[in-house]
Amino acid sequence: MIKIKNLKAEIDGKEILKGIDLEIQPGKVHAIMGPNGSGKSTLSYILAGREEYKVTAGDIELNGESILEMAPEERAAKGVFLAFQYPVEIPGVQMTTFMKTALNSVRKARGLKELDALDFLKLMKSKCKELGISDEMMKRAVTVGFSGGEKKRNEVLQMAMLEPKFSVLDETDSGLDIDALKIVADGVNKMRGGDKSFLVITHYQRLLDYIKPDVVHVLAGGRIVKTGGPELAQELEKTGYANVA
Amino acid sequence: MLPELPSPKLERWKYTNLERALKKIKLTPTALGWGSDVKLLNPHAPGEAQYKDTQLWDLNTSHTKDIKFITSDETIEIIAAEGHWLSPRLVIQVKDGQTVTVIERQNGQGAYWKNGVAQITIGKNAKLRHYRIFEEAEGAVSTQFIHVKIGRDGTYEGFNHIEGAGLIRNQVHTELIGENGTFGIAGLNLLRGEQHSDTTITIEHKAPHCNSNQTYKSVLDGKSRCVFQGKVHVHQIAQKTDGYQLSNALILSPQAEMDTKPELEIYADDVKCSHGATTGKLDEEPLFYMRARGIPEKEARSLLITSFCAQAIDTITDEGIQGNIKEKMAQWLASRT
């Protein structure tokens, strides 16, 4: 379970988050919707441990343990995953090397045996197949020359490989056509259930047609201003953010 | 007593103060026991009149008691000890049509000075692979001067792996004298502490249709300082020259310094010459991305540094040496604190 308590944060002296309270039970999918500049991406970066943001108050707990003081890699090992809005390109580092290093780092931190090259490749190929992703992508340098859709599919593949307990999807729908959106949504839906929690951050309701949330929150001006069921997303699609912000 | 040394007042010694470094060491001329009864010695360096920075060549000539004549594959280990002043001389001749691989492993212990010279001739349609691995002691000074003359369709493939000395100067002078010759040189500088590494390269294109390529990657930690001066001189006759020079430096510490001076001097009108020089820090974005995927910070940095250096290491065509350099690189990264 993830618990965000009265979270306040700033960057360069400017307060972005002004007290966020949010609790996601195991197995549940929450969505955060909100206009541009409401603090959506800031929240996702802070959850993943980006150091440029200064948390000035509050706490974030994963299964009863505060993760606020943990480095990004420690959070990843504990089971936090951020699917980036803009996945980063790393020329010269092959996807396979990157993925194997990441998976084995996380496995090591979780007290599991590291995978050798052969077992790793087997696992990767089976995950690619499961998600309908071509494993040719893994021979290239990290996201270099990937299309928008490939980049996002690659994020979902990484999520599937690292088996996080709590995943944040930051505007995963941006720049995706419907086919790519379906692949990404299918990937998330396959991982749903059990004790895995998700936070889906989006500007548009479109993604939520494919990933049905249990709870929808509206973030505006650094605060959650409204919480409701999936119907809230439909409502926002019709009326826009003007009435809630 | 120290001999007369190149002073930083000379343009091409601007960034490197040899005298200051050598003053700290008590030196005794020492021989490796190779013997010196080889006649093929160029007493003076080529390019003397033009570049006026060849004193160390002459000094090697007057002091050397160690001359090695090489015409086939060879691995040479030059090991110095405290107080040594070595003046080894390599004479490498690759005959027409032959391919030769020469590996130099340079190391030692304590404070010493190596003033080495290598004079190299590569015949028609011949190839030399020249791999030099410098792991000199922290207190050591190493000055190296090589001259390469490349005949028609000849190829030089050089790689310099530089992890030490305290101060190292690698001076390279090449003459492409036959058509369709290729000179390729690449290197890695992995520096920390107060190390100083100076690479000064002059390439003279003296025949048409020749290629030259320089690919240097420097990783600077601590208070280290790195110098890269690369000059491509295209003579009037050398039409269709293709020359490229690349020097990329990665600064890991705010106290480290990189000085880069690319120079092109072109007298032919149908040539393709360019250079690229960058000096920068590690990008934060990929670093965060990797850490968010669970890769510990130190390992993430190492991966990024390794990928930064790959382009230089990839120029090595000998798989064994390439693997060897990759291992050395990994060891260097692992020993970072």
Image (tube, coloured by chain):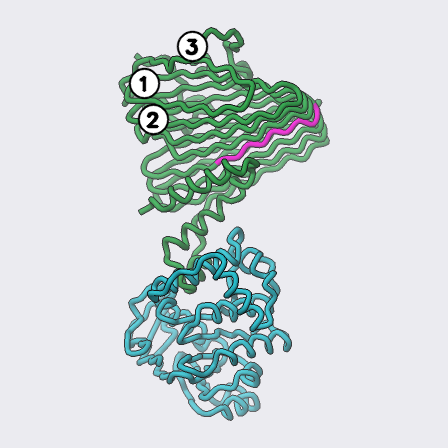
What residue appears at the point 40 percent right and 63 percent down from the top-left corner? Answer: B294
A169 vs B176, left or right, is left
Residue B222 at what x, y percent from top left?
33, 42
Q: Is residue B240 above or below residue A27?
A: above
Q: Residue at x 43, y 42 (%)?
A: B327
Marks 3/2: CA–CA distance = 20 Å
The span from disc 1 to disc 2 (Cα, nearest Å) is: 10 Å
Q: Nearer the viewer, residue A29 or A103?
A: A103
The chain holding disc 2 is: B
Q: Position of residue B101 (x, y in %)?
A: 54, 27
Q: Which residue is mark 3?
A: B35
The magenta region covers: B179-187
Q: Are marks 1 and 2 on the same chain?
A: yes
Q: Chain of mark 1?
A: B
Secondary structure state at the residue bearing disc 1: strand
Task: Residue B4: say if magenta.
Answer: no
Residue B244 is left or right of residue A245, and the answer is right
Query: Going from the N terminus, do you reach mark 1 or mark 3 first?
Result: 3
Chain ID, cyan in image = A
| Local secondary structure at mark 3 | loop
Q: Earlier in the sequence, mark 1 or mark 2?
A: 1
Q: Which residue is mark 2?
A: B108
